[in-house]
Amino acid sequence: MSGRIATDYEIKDSGNRNMSASYTETELPYVHKVGKPPKQDLLKEIKTTLKETFLSDDPLKPFKDQPRKKKFVLGLQAFFPILSWSRDYSFSKFKGDFIAGCTIASLCIPQDIGYAKLANLLPQYGLYTSFVPPLIYAFMGSSRDIAIGPVAVVSLLLGTMLQNEVDPVKQKHEYLRLAFTATFFAGITQAALGFLRLGFLIDFLSHAAIVGFMGGAAVTIALQQLKGLFGIKNFTKKTDIVSVMRSVINSAHHGWNWQTILIGVSFLIFLLVAKFIGKRNKRLFWVPAIAPLISVIVSTFFVFITHAERHGVNIVRHIEKGINPSSVHEIYFSGPYLTKGFKIGVVAGLIALTEAVAIGRTFASMKDYQLDGNKEMVALGSMNIIGSMTSCYVATGSFSRSAVNYMAGCNTAVSNIVMSMIVMLTLFVITPLFKYTPNAILASIIISAVLGLIDIDAVLLLWKIDKFDFIACMGAFFGVIFVSVEIGLLISVAISFAKILLQVTRPRTALLGKIPRTSVYRNIEQYPGATRVPGVLIIRVDSAIYFSNSNYIKERILRWLTEEEETFKDHPKVEYLIVDMSPVTDIDTSGIHALEELQSSLNKRKVQLVLTNPGQTVLDKLHASHFADHIGEDKIFLTVNDAVLTLAPKMEQA
Amino acid sequence: MSGRIATDYEIKDSGNRNMSASYTETELPYVHKVGKPPKQDLLKEIKTTLKETFLSDDPLKPFKDQPRKKKFVLGLQAFFPILSWSRDYSFSKFKGDFIAGCTIASLCIPQDIGYAKLANLLPQYGLYTSFVPPLIYAFMGSSRDIAIGPVAVVSLLLGTMLQNEVDPVKQKHEYLRLAFTATFFAGITQAALGFLRLGFLIDFLSHAAIVGFMGGAAVTIALQQLKGLFGIKNFTKKTDIVSVMRSVINSAHHGWNWQTILIGVSFLIFLLVAKFIGKRNKRLFWVPAIAPLISVIVSTFFVFITHAERHGVNIVRHIEKGINPSSVHEIYFSGPYLTKGFKIGVVAGLIALTEAVAIGRTFASMKDYQLDGNKEMVALGSMNIIGSMTSCYVATGSFSRSAVNYMAGCNTAVSNIVMSMIVMLTLFVITPLFKYTPNAILASIIISAVLGLIDIDAVLLLWKIDKFDFIACMGAFFGVIFVSVEIGLLISVAISFAKILLQVTRPRTALLGKIPRTSVYRNIEQYPGATRVPGVLIIRVDSAIYFSNSNYIKERILRWLTEEEETFKDHPKVEYLIVDMSPVTDIDTSGIHALEELQSSLNKRKVQLVLTNPGQTVLDKLHASHFADHIGEDKIFLTVNDAVLTLAPKMEQA
């Protein structure tokens, strides 16, 4: 390693002043210049930014350089992935799909009836929602494992928001119409996000907030089921834990029906045992999957022969026979209910989307295939739009049924078609048999289903990894169970945003020291062995410098200097303040202002400002604003080591 | 440089597995371990975060280890900085303050009368606002250069928002009361932000947005003055440029008064010439400063002797004599106007705060003294609260008058006291003399004052440095002039937030290459001389990995890999994917998930994931989540160079 400086690399960049030349005599190892690439085209720059934001997955790439006919086929395939995967479809794949489809059908039928009640709708609407949307999704969706249908959390959310506007008992028809309107706009919202390629917006709901929200919703839903499980007649309409428990306790003397409790609790135990078995032995996954249907059959038969309904056991009584009637004319396209339906639809649609995308991503990464988030949104949106016209309410991917689908060996979305066909047959043929099904069984099924949404492991992990995430999670959880689903959701979103804002306003800065016998400078706090260079203070700024943090960064750097001077009074005076810009990915005009102010403050304290390793964008802006000329190009270095070697060679050896 | 590895540093950290030991044979230079500091206390961690967020300036530091009596004195001085600086006050300082005070008084008196009209208030309220608030500020504020009083933008904003609620002509008294209520809550908002140490919130309004908003407001205010300048009677109440120009053109035939135009335009030319002189020769700064008062005196005298008011020249007519009456009982503390006043107050208070803090910071950095943002807010808030009880409306720091104050050689806030006293004398003695002052003069004065708010240089700089900032600026500007002040403000805030969110969702990633003959790896795009290492792909992630970007980062890294494999088909297969985590300052649970998913995807493609230089927080979380064990501690390196030397020594030499 000699002191030879003029490398090929430097010759290439000969447009810049050769800073290194003056140091040849001092026999320093390579001092390299900071790269100053040719200025980028403005249009190109904007294009790149827009592309990374909206088209980061490059959806038009396959269309490039293709004949027009091929483009049309590709376009059709983009909207209907079934056209591409169905060509490789085989009987062996169908076997897996068929078994999986039957399994999730047996799981979804009792769940559907229960979930419809959560949304204050008649049981058949739950079944309708398991017929049309899965069919549409099978043609348009790209996830192979998701199981589509009504889900607990969205049903509860929809039910709560709808009954705030319309009374589900007194204004039955208006309520139903508003539900379809909301479903329509939920679909529109989802499809619009996908078309406009704004899918990344749902990333703003943090994982931690979702865990808390889902857990809270699960507890709320389980508590609501106490009505059915205990056969309580006068039950509160509120969903917070205080009102519900008061309702339960107040009705303890007269409102509880022991026959109902007996049936409900015994089948709940049966379902939980089945769940436990399925968890212990993954090959017995089908046990918890068919347990609900068995419970329904057994309990229905039991009620039928004992006529328990005459002893106060509530039963389903009636489910409309036949498949989905049209509901095109039921949707409000004008009047005051239009805006209400729109608002409810947007919220429900976003939550449904979040759930579906989370499920889709999880299974896609387990089987290692790519999922196009925006395309998924268009598929989910279309299925809800068509659903709203065929008497369905908001459908999405269900956590529990998708897991069963996956474990039962589904290969493609055909399992959804199979499930959908079985639901259709159920609607045509066997709905009258549900007449004697006790409501307590539906309550037990819902409780055992939603318990899976309470993810204690995830919460423990949050606690272990990130305390702020844990607080966000708990905020959402307690918001849902103590106030309401909407407030819990609001808290989740607010906490998620607060975290982003905090990150942006108060970035970290670190004092760097030299790791002995290397040319590497690292955070002194993290590497206690790293040593300070006398007379030089090296600070790394760990964030882009924007208006939101530029003042803080400036003041924090000055504070580092003051603290250093106060702590080490006997050390040589700090002559150079090196700001390592490696992590500074961008800077805006406020950031440049802050640097200018920093420099003028430092000048007054007789300290020289030195920058190291500014990135391309930052360097461009330092030059555009003439700040680079202002502090002198010889004060900008490629590495901290170069800067120290050049500016303080004596100090370094000290 | 030999291959000796066991340094003191490594012995210190001997708790970790000594990764380097196995490479001694290959004679590599120092391969250092990644620092794994002892786990931080949870409470300490939270305390540090809270402290950096709210108490980053360590306001309690001087109080530490002081006797109780000293603490009390320090506390008083903290609230009333005058107690500390007045002890060093001298006659020579007073000389500067006196001259500056007289100069800004001569500037503020005509401005005050005009600005009060912008807020739809009688002229004396402008003068009242230049009497009490500057006095309070002199005792509590810490800026030495700011000139307090009513300002154009806040007056316009307040006037617009108030007249949306109450008609300023038909409901005169209610309008006045609502104005005081809004002022009261503006003060409360400002003081509360200061007390709660939430001052950093105003940093969320970006510099670019402020430039645009101020420019737009200046144009809007200037257009409003066409009414006075042309003597138009039927003038629109809207502030957008289209309505105003229509108003002006429609009144061209009958509504214009040539005498008014003659007086207005000639004095406007006089003022602009004076301004130009002041700009060309900094020592003649007093020319534009006293020009308005001269205009007022001359034009008033002219109207008085010619009785131009009989020829349709509008005059001020009447200004109440005497100082501020009490308005404590005028503030609405109940009823529907309470909430309206509160809302208007919050908005006006925040804008006033932004302006004052920006001015304070500018001059503090010019004279190099520190300004405590939170303390400033308490001072500004207190002055507006007291102002609202003494018939003042929202006061803040004025750009133009502060600049004059600075140039006239003010030393302390005493110049504000001098100004305040002169305004008081004016109120007592000479208000009747303003009777014949033509409104056209006030219009010219306002136009010439607000033109200074249009900062074309700043806009050009924005264009040069940061295109996104430029767009934000233009958005705010056109929002104000084409729609309304509030919409413009809303656009500014929305754009500022959009920028933050964009930054957080779509962080940059860069492909690194080795700069020849160094051990330094840098962005290949920025340093075209940097070379790829065959079989190794090195990617730097330029942001903290949070829920909002974790999916994007994962997919972007995989896309880099795919692109690389497609572009260099003849190169050796990529075996190692090194993710340089240097700029990754933090990671949350979603980020850990994304890394796990990344690793499983890479495993399926037979590529090994390697991390380099994770920071302290990140490393803690990698360990807490067991991801570090999962990928193996021997896959985490201190530098990219270490990783390449260790994993691909043959490739590196190729």
Image: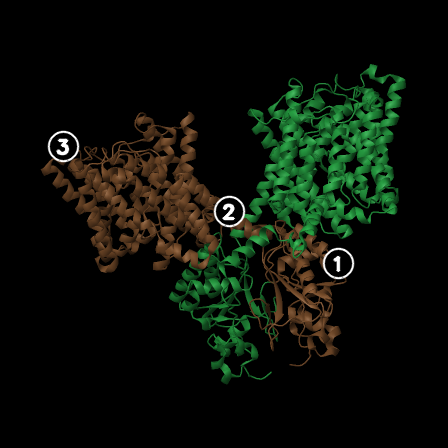
Chain colours: A brown, B green
Q: Nearer the viewer, residue B152 or A177?
A: B152
Task: Label 2, secondary structure: give it.
Answer: helix
Disc 2: which residue:
A497
Give the residue at the far left of this rendering.
Answer: A305
Amino acid tagged 1: His
Disc 3 marks a residue whose amino acid type is Arg
In the shown orientation, is residue A167 left or right of residue B324?
A: left
Where is residue B391, by image quadrant?
top right
The image quadrant where one finds the N terminus of chain A is bottom right
Q: Name the residue under label 3.
A: A310
Q: Please tell me which residue lies in front, B653 or B318.
A: B318
* Badge 3 element: helix
Label whose residue precedes the other's in the sequence (1 or 2) = 2
Tell me, yes or no, if residue A384 can be seen here: no
Label 1: chain letter: A
Q: What separation in Å lies between label 1 and label 2 (alpha carbons)? A: 38 Å
Point out residue A50 in the picture as x, y percentages from the top left corner.
54, 49
For marks 1 and 3 on the same chain, the one whose residue lies earlier in the sequence:
3
Report x, y in % for residue B125.
73, 27
- The residue that mark 1 highlights is A630
Horizontal side of B562 relative to B381 (left or right) equals left
- Given this view, does label 1 or label 3 mark the residue nearer the observer? 3
